[in-house]
Amino acid sequence: MAMPKTSLVMSLFAAALAMALPGAASAQQPLPVNAGAAWAHAHSGIVIPATLGGLARMRATSFADPELDISQNFGSSDGNQQLTVYIFRNTNGTVPIWFAQAQRAISLREDLKNPGLAIGPAAFTPPGQATASGLKAVFAPAGVEGIRSTGVALFAVGDWYVKMRATSATQSPGELSASMEDALSEIRLPQTGAAVAAEPIADCAAKLAFTGNAADSALPVKTLTAGVQTPAPRITASRWCIDGIVGGNRAVYRPEGTADRYLLAIGDNGKAVAVQPHAAGYYSANFIVAAQIVALVAQDRLPTPQRALDLVEKKRAAGTTVTWPPR
């Protein structure tokens, strides 16, 4: 017997939710790799060698199949050097947004004791590109045994984000920064055309204003099209700013100069809620994960980030669109 449409939507939503919310069940599983051999990402053509920066591959993990969100961990035999490469889908946002999320993830780690920034954040030119389209920062944790420096770098390769995390017990922040770029140069990256120059994201000049409490839109169903019956267009901008932190590693970003839309980033691997208005008089909220966009119930005005999170956490889904494989 076929599953009713409503049940199917909620089943897909539950799966997406499980992959997105901190503390929820994880879908991670081993990523098949051949020992001693380079690994090629099926969708982008990115090739990661079995040894990176002189460190052997220790583990490979898939967080969303098929290869939509993966990581590969490398380390020295004595445990003094560790490096992880992540690849995840570029479904929303920009390099500055997801770099800011990655940087905040480091600062929130309790074992690093609120580490101080030693270098950056600053732009760098990824291997094979002609533009400083990546961002990098290095921290110097104080009083943390076995960690002298730890850093993160992030850039885009076509429809994919590449992130590198590195930690050293012996290298200074400057030495770690240089070794990260050396390791990145060993990854084979496909040519994807002109890259966009990146710069660290700045605070918005003024905070978003919310008028009244948003509620479910009372407009007729036939009016609720983009963002409800079908996904809303991706929010794009030449420059973004950060409006504020909701809590933990959940932050609100919006295109500079706008006051009617935002992207609520959840974690540091591409999951987000995109909120924007429609000319028909409602606001859509689309929950974006690696392979799906879940349309949440349309709202009658700009919902607060907490309202958007409540729609996600209470599974207020209006429909789900599968975005991978591309159609």
Image: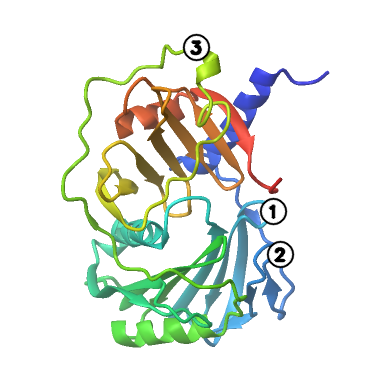
Compared to residue 286, the image places residue 299 above or below, namely above
Q: CA distance from mark 3 to mark 1?
A: 38 Å
Other-residue count near label 2 (Cα within 10 Å), few / some / many at <14 / 14–19 / ≥20: few
Mark 2: amino acid = Ala
**Residue position for label 1:** 66
Q: Quadrant of residue 275?
A: top left
Mark 1: amino acid = Pro
Q: Secondary structure at mark 3?
A: loop
Q: Is residue 172 at least partly visible in the picture?
A: no
Q: CA distance from mark 3 to mark 2?
A: 43 Å
Q: CA distance from mark 1 to mark 2?
A: 9 Å
Q: Is residue 56 at least partly visible in the picture?
A: yes
Label pair 1/2, CB-CB below 8 angstroms: yes
Instruction: Tell which circle, 1 or 2, labels the residue nearer the N-terminal end.
Output: 2
Percent of width and height locating residue 307: 34, 27
Other-residue count near label 1 (Cα within 10 Å), few / some / many at <14 / 14–19 / ≥20: some
Q: Secondary structure at mark 1?
A: loop
Residue 42 numbered mark, or none: 2
Mark 3: amino acid = Pro
Residue at the image point whose x is 27% and y is 53% from the top: 241
51 vs 297, left or right, is right
Furthest residue to the right?
1
Instruction: Tell which circle, 3 or 1, labels the residue nearer the N-terminal end.
Output: 1
**Residue position for label 3:** 220
Instruction: Tell which circle, 3 or 2, labels the residue nearer the N-terminal end.
Output: 2
Compared to residue 292, the image places residue 69 above or below, namely below
Compared to residue 208, the image places residue 149 above or below, namely below
134 vs 156, left or right, is left
Furthest residue to the left?
206
Percent of width and height locating residue 276: 39, 35
Percent of width and height locating residue 87: 56, 63
Q: Secondary structure at mark 2?
A: loop
